[in-house]
Amino acid sequence: MKKTGIGARLLSLLFPRVCSLCGGPSPDGELCAECRRKYAAGTFLRCPRCRQTADRCLCGTEFTESTRTTLAHRPFLALNFYIPAKRGGEDDDRVTERMILDLKSRGSYADFFAGECARQIGRLLDEAGERREDWILTFAPRSPEKFAECGFDQGEEVGRRIAERLGIPFERTLARTSHSSEQKTLRAEERRENAQEGLIPRRRSIRAGGRYLLFDDIITTGSTVRTAAELLYECGAEAVFPVALARTYPAEDRTDRGRTGEFRRSP
Ligand SMILES: [Zn+2]
Ligand SMILES: [Zn+2]
């Protein structure tokens, strides 16, 4: 029940409800209407090369060769483009970036992002005629150093909430080594393979024939997704479908590499 009366009025004077992102007034202390509008508008941002939105643009998505799986003709789900600050861009395009930075540093917006992801994954599974209960939500973990620094893993925070909303299992299938332990525990060959990502499979946690929704916050080059997918398949997974909050905004066309027309595996 909503609190009223002198106590609530005093509380709202002492702790005014403000938008967690812009500091403007917000009735529930969550994102204000204006920030929600900017976030929503951002999801319509189009790639400078192919003019598609983040969930349809295939520029620089060679990682999908490793993930192999499509749902309703899509090789992955990305809610939005992420425009790094150094790339310029309007203030309105900053909303997603700032929310993701807050998510990484403080765990903010995990519920918000999980809700957005779950809604879209649910839609894709329905369109593809897939049963939700056949899928498992997993994530690419952050490094032990980062975990120690922040005290949480944003992939786990959001991933667990997505799984809850979809009513599917949430499982840790991958670990990330620290540099020091990696040197000690991996053979030279494995070390070379994993040097870039430090990802290792938790073999006993990976189900043979498992169908995985692989959550990662941002897909930049796609190398994390690629490595994670290869490890999951090696351990018996049957399907790996990447889910991300955002993809790095493709640079203006400098070369012809990675244009839509060159994407060979047509969905
Ligand atoms: Zn706001
Ligand atoms: Zn594109």
Image: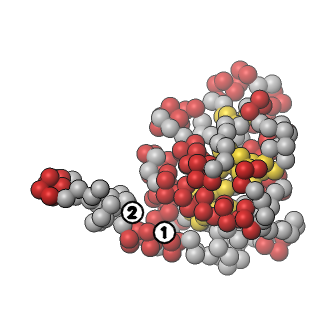
The numbered disc on residue 31 is 2
Residue occupying image coordinates x 80% and y 44%: 210
Direction from residue 28 to residue 117 in the image, left or right: right
Q: Judge the density around disc 1: few (<14), some (14-19), many (≥20) Cα neighbours within 10 Å.
A: many
Q: Is residue 182 left or right of residue 38?
A: right
Where residue 39 is drawn, which disc sits there? 1
x, y percent for residue 178:
63, 30
Q: Residue at 73% across / 22% down in the picture?
A: 185
Looking at the rendered structure, the kind of residue marked 2 is: Leu
Crowdedness near tag 2: few (<14), some (14–19) or many (≥20) residues, C-alpha within 10 Å: many
Query: How many numbered markers are drawn?
Result: 2
Could you tell me residue 28's position as x and y percent? 33, 60
104 shown above or below 120: above
Answer whether residue 227 is visible to the viewer in this image. Answer: no
- Closest to the observer: 125 or 71? 125
Mark closer to the chain start, 2 or 1: 2
Determine whether, in the image, residue 152 is placed left or right of residue 52: left
Picture quarter with the N terminus:
bottom left
Q: Is residue 204 above or below residue 266?
A: above
Image coordinates of residue 167 in percent, x first then y, are: 63, 50
Which secondary structure, mark 1?
helix
Q: Taking 146 as reference, is 14 above or below it?
A: below
The residue located at (80%, 25%) in the rendering is 187
What element does badge 2 sit on? loop
Q: Nearer the viewer, residue 103 or 73?
A: 73
Q: Which residue is most to the bottom? A: 51
* Residue 77 occupies quadrant: bottom right
Question: Do the residues under discs 2 and 1 have CB atoms within 8 angstroms?
Answer: yes
> Which residue sits furthest front?
1
* Disc 2 C-beta below 8 A from ligand 1: yes
